[in-house]
Image: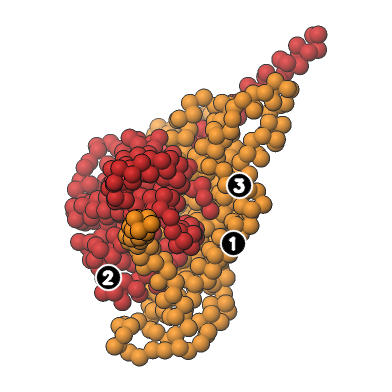
Amino acid sequence: MSEAIRESRLKKTLSTLGRGAVYIVMGLFAFMTLYPIFWLIMNSFKTTREFQVSQLALPRAATLQNYVEAWKMGEFGLLFPNSIIYTLGATAGIIFLSLMAGFAFAKLKSKATKPIYNSFIIGILLTTQTLMIPLFLEVNLLGIYNTRLAVLLVYIGAGLPIGIYLSTEYIKAIPSAVVESARIDGAGFFKILLKIIIPMSVPVATTLAMLNITNTWNEFALINILVSKTELKSLPLGIYKFSGSLSTDYGKQFAALTIGMVPMLVFYVIFRKQITKGVAAGAIKG
Amino acid sequence: MASTNRAHREEGRAYWAMVTPAFALYLLVMAFPIVLSVILSVSNYSGGRMFGGERWGFVGFGAYVRVFTDPWFWNALKNNLYIVLVSLFGQLPLGFIFAYFIYAKIVKAPGFWQGVLYVPNIISVIVVGLLWQTIFSPHGPIGEIVNHVRVGNFQAQLKSIFDAAGGFSLSDDVINKILHLAGPAGRSMFSDPVPELRDLLSSYQGQPMNDVYAALSNLFVQKWSPAFLTKPDVAMLPVLFVILWMYTGMYLILFLANMQKIDGQIIESARIDGANESQVMRFIILPALSGTIVNSAILAISGSLSSFALIFAMTGGGPSRVTEILSIYMYNNAFLGRPNFPLANAISLIMVLISFALIALTKVVEKRYGGKED
């Protein structure tokens, strides 16, 4: 009996120790995640001179001068609206086109569904970035290099595979009786799409919005080859400008990086649950 | 009969009206570039207008031969492979273990861990790349921390030497001990160390001890410069570290979401039947997640193929091209110096073919595991 008690006590001690070790490892990881971000924001309020003296201390006299200068140099006043246009435009386009095609794939009969739908599925793993050189040449060939249209078309096209996959699977689960009874009442297919399917698809539309807002806002590789004019550039392109010769002007660089990071951090804090749900849904399929 | 026919036609028209916009755009962005890269990779196109400009045409498969005989191609492929290995043996297992800790309630506050560890994923990779570039640079905080510790150690040892001597003393014994502490590099600063150091220290007579310590550590402690990203033999390590740092949280989210789909009652009843933690893991959780694990592995491989911006921002492929990956190798061939579009398109197509091979692999794996659970 006492043997058993001792054993269970040992087990308990071990599990407490194990739990402590788990907290330490995960805590270390969490610290490594948060500290660099904190460090970046903190140093963005220091002058470059003060940064060079000490990078770990809190700023002695916080200055906003870095932000003023970085905003001007990066021309963020121009880039911010562009990022918003690209993000909202691409996200809205992807959601609408995906729900529309998804409705057709899920509820309308056609022999074409199988090959077309499968070609979209293939596109999920075929990342557009591997195609950036031919895309660059294609956009030039079509005469839409350096246009917002090209950026939006490419972003929407790249977002469609996962959008169509998730929409089709979602709409398939809506009972066909809903569509059929609306048909009997004399409703056309577009009316059914707009009045019934889209309102019922808000959850999947939310998932797609979360996935595409974060992806598009942060996208760099494609827009980098699609536009070269400042008035068409997005925020990540502007931030990249602070890498080369400006990279030793730490104050301004940190302010620029913070400007690039904060909008998404705020978005994440507000929509964390929906974003992580979208990630889990979006990564499921290969 | 006529009315069903009309309804049929209406359905067909609606179908194409709904599918065509998406499909056309998809072809424009995915299919057409692939066709274009096939054509250009076997041509001698060298930029400029494609029609009506300089004439160009078919020249054969020379670009592919050049890619496969270029050591830099294999260097880039090797770096992509490193990224895959870090994903498969770093991000995935860590993400899985962390997810399990949260799922099994070994740690409290599940929302906190999920929320924090996912943060790097929502920050622009350009910001991440430039941030870590600074952290790993000679001007970064790592160097400051290390040097701070070194100076602290050195001064503590000095203090114990002087304390043992009962305060500021320039006896041979103290001088020798300081020189010993300074090491060979420190001693080599003098031609005749003992008297020269005594001369130097005598000027500090009567000053606060802290000034003496500071002066000696300035003189003897060698500043360490953590130039990770500028040393070719180690530059890939910080890059891989950042990739691990960035994406582990994503796999955590993925695994946790799928663990939470497991019916809790199965685990409950297994426990009642006397199953321990490792048996639950082995016979319930792992089989339930096999499809997710395989999918994540394939996602990790295709993710490594598409990765570009992080390394582009962090190292630009340098120093001396050691951190170049396939996408940067391709980009540089097209945009750096004289453009070599046939070569760049050949690289692009090779990457596409690797993706297709992966997709085929997914299909095989899916059949075997039946892993289509969602």
The subunit carrying tag 1 is B
Q: Residues within 10 Å of mark 1 (few under 14, many from 20)?
A: some
Q: Are marks 1 and 2 in contact (CB under 8 Å)?
A: no
* Residue pictured at 43% horizontal, 86% vertical: B44
Q: Position of residue A185 (x, y in %)?
A: 30, 42
Task: Say whether residue A39 is visible.
Answer: no
- The quarter holding residue A110 reads bottom left
Q: Residues within 10 Å of mark 2 (few under 14, many from 20)?
A: some
* Residue pictured at 44% horizontal, 72% vertical: B34
Chain identifier, red in the render: A
Q: Which residue is disc 1 drawn over?
A: B360
Q: In 3D space, how far apart are the residues under numbered discs 1 and 3 (Cα atoms)?
A: 15 Å
In front: mark 2 or mark 3? Answer: 3
Q: In the displayed image of the protein, which residue is found farthest to the front?
A: B1
Amino acid type at mark 1: Ala
Q: In 3D space, how far apart are the residues under numbered discs 1 and 2 (Cα atoms)?
A: 34 Å
Q: Position of residue A188 (x, y in %)?
A: 29, 50
Mark 3: secondary structure: loop
Q: Image check: B119 left or right of A14?
A: left
The subunit carrying tag 3 is B
Chain identifier, orange in the render: B
- The quarter holding residue B341 reads bottom left
Amino acid type at mark 3: Gly
Q: Which mark is residue B371?
A: 3
Q: Image check: B51 left or right of A107?
A: left
* Residue pictured at 72% horizontal, 26% vertical: B275
Do circles 1 and 2 both sit on a common chain? no
Q: Position of residue B61 (x, y in %)?
A: 53, 84
